[in-house]
Image: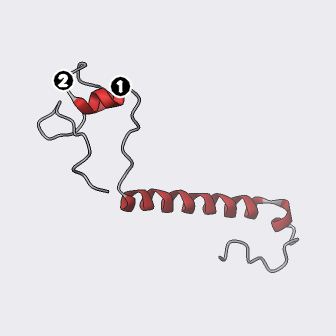
Amino acid sequence: MSTENLVRHTCTPDGRALPFGRKAPEGECPRCDELRNGAAPRAAHPAIQAGIDRRANEARQLAELEKHFASEKHRTGGCGICTFGQW
């Protein structure tokens, strides 16, 4: 994705948005105006998003393991030689 077509914030000296979701007064910052008019916020860099997705997937897998090991089927030996979660 090319960055030359992106409208940047002009409400701060470093080109970032105002903190805490605040917006500059109307007409002072073109990016704040875009956001105020319904533009979607920019997505995280793909490398950052991959890390977020990986941590969410690991948390989901851990929850599945904990649920299985706490289940009656596992505690009574109903799953035999348990290999659940060895993927």
Task: Pick out the residue farthest to the top.
Answer: 25
| Of residues 86 and 73, the one drawn nearer to the viewer in this rendering | 86
Please identify the residue farthest to the left as the structure is shown.
Answer: 13
Residue placed under numbered mark 2 in the picture: 28
Q: Residue at x 85, y 60 (%)?
A: 72
Residue found farthest to the bottom: 81
The kind of residue on which mark 2 rests is: Glu
Q: Position of residue 22 (x, y in %)?
A: 29, 26
Looking at the picture, the colour scheme in use is secondary structure
Q: CA distance from mark 2 to mark 1?
A: 12 Å
Type of amino acid under label 1 = Arg
Residue drawn where x is 61% and y is 62% of the image: 62
Looking at the rendering, which quadrant does residue 23 occupy?
A: top left
Residue 82: quarter of image: bottom right
Instruction: Name the spot of residue 70 as percent of width and height, x first.
Output: 75, 59
**Vertical placement of 10 versus 58: above or below?**
above
Q: Residue 55: horizontal and vertical position, in percent?
A: 49, 59
Which residue carries the number 1 mark? 36
Q: Residues within 10 Å of mark 1 (few under 14, many from 20)?
A: few
Q: Is residue 50 left or right of residue 62?
A: left
Q: Residue drawn 37% across and 62% down?
A: 47
The label number, if any, that marks residue 47 in the structure image: none
| Left or right, 40 with reference to 26 | right
